[in-house]
Amino acid sequence: MIKRVFIDASVLVKLFDDNAPVKQAAARNLIGDVDNTTLVTSALSMADFYEEVTSKFSRNLETVTAKQALNDLTELTIVQIDSDLVLAATETQTVLNIEMREAVTIEAAFTSGCDFIVTEVLDQSHTVKGIHIRSLEEMMNNKDNEDD
């Protein structure tokens, strides 16, 4: 069964986080193992990723490396942020009492038909708008159990 999985910026940055080698390996495994899975992210998550790895890491990536990583991420399905998505996110933000960035992530995943959001920042282990929210670790554990 083909799944659609939304990967937010908090997971994308783990691809380069040498200070968290287990999560880094899990992120690389998740991104690299796309059998029966469509990986989705948003333009906002890509922008957040770039800002994080170039200015907020303990050892920032060189600009050229970060730009190459962004270029590689364009292989994922990218949800564009438009006025309809932002308006829907304002409703989600109000109903769930969450930050706007989190609401945009949920709406981007919802409008692109994702089954899961993999995140390190959203409240995990529950379902919102029919989308299962999981941590990177939890998603990898589920994958391991499916392989058994």
Image (cartoon, helix red, strand yellow):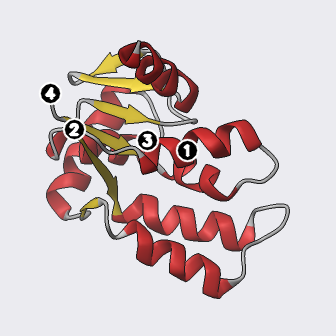
Q: Which of the 4 quarters of the picture holds residue 41?
A: bottom left
Q: Nearer the viewer, residue 33 or 44?
A: 33
User: Along the polypeptide, which appears first: circle 3 or circle 1?
Assistant: 1
Q: Residues within 10 Å of mark 2 (few under 14, many from 20)?
A: few
Dot 4 amino acid type: Met
Q: Is residue 142 above or below residue 19?
A: above
Is label 3 in a helix, a strand or a loop?
Answer: helix
**Quadrant, the N terminus:** top left
Q: Which residue is mark 1?
A: 27
Give the label, 3 or 1, closer to the camera. 1
Residue 123 visible in the current orientation: no
Dot 2 amino acid type: Asn
The residue located at (55%, 49%) in the rendering is 28
**Quadrant, the C terminus:** top left
Q: Which residue is mark 3?
A: 102
User: Along the polypeptide, which appears first: circle 4 or circle 1?
Assistant: 4
Q: Is residue 15 left or right of residue 92?
A: right
Give the label, 2 or 3, closer to the camera. 2
Mark 1–mark 2 distance (CA, rounded to whole Å): 17 Å
Q: Residues within 10 Å of mark 3 (few under 14, many from 20)?
A: some
Q: Is residue 129 left or right of residue 5?
A: left
The residue located at (53%, 62%) in the rendering is 48
Marks 4 and 1 in Cβ contact (< 8 Å): no
Is label 2 in a helix, a strand or a loop?
Answer: loop
Dot 1 amino acid type: Ala
Q: Which residue is mark 2?
A: 36
The tag on residue 1 is: 4
Q: Residues within 10 Å of mark 1 (few under 14, many from 20)?
A: many
Marks 4 and 2 in Cβ contact (< 8 Å): yes
- Residue 93 placed where, x, y %? 36, 36
Is label 1 in a helix, a strand or a loop?
Answer: helix
- Residue 39 placed where, x, y %? 30, 48
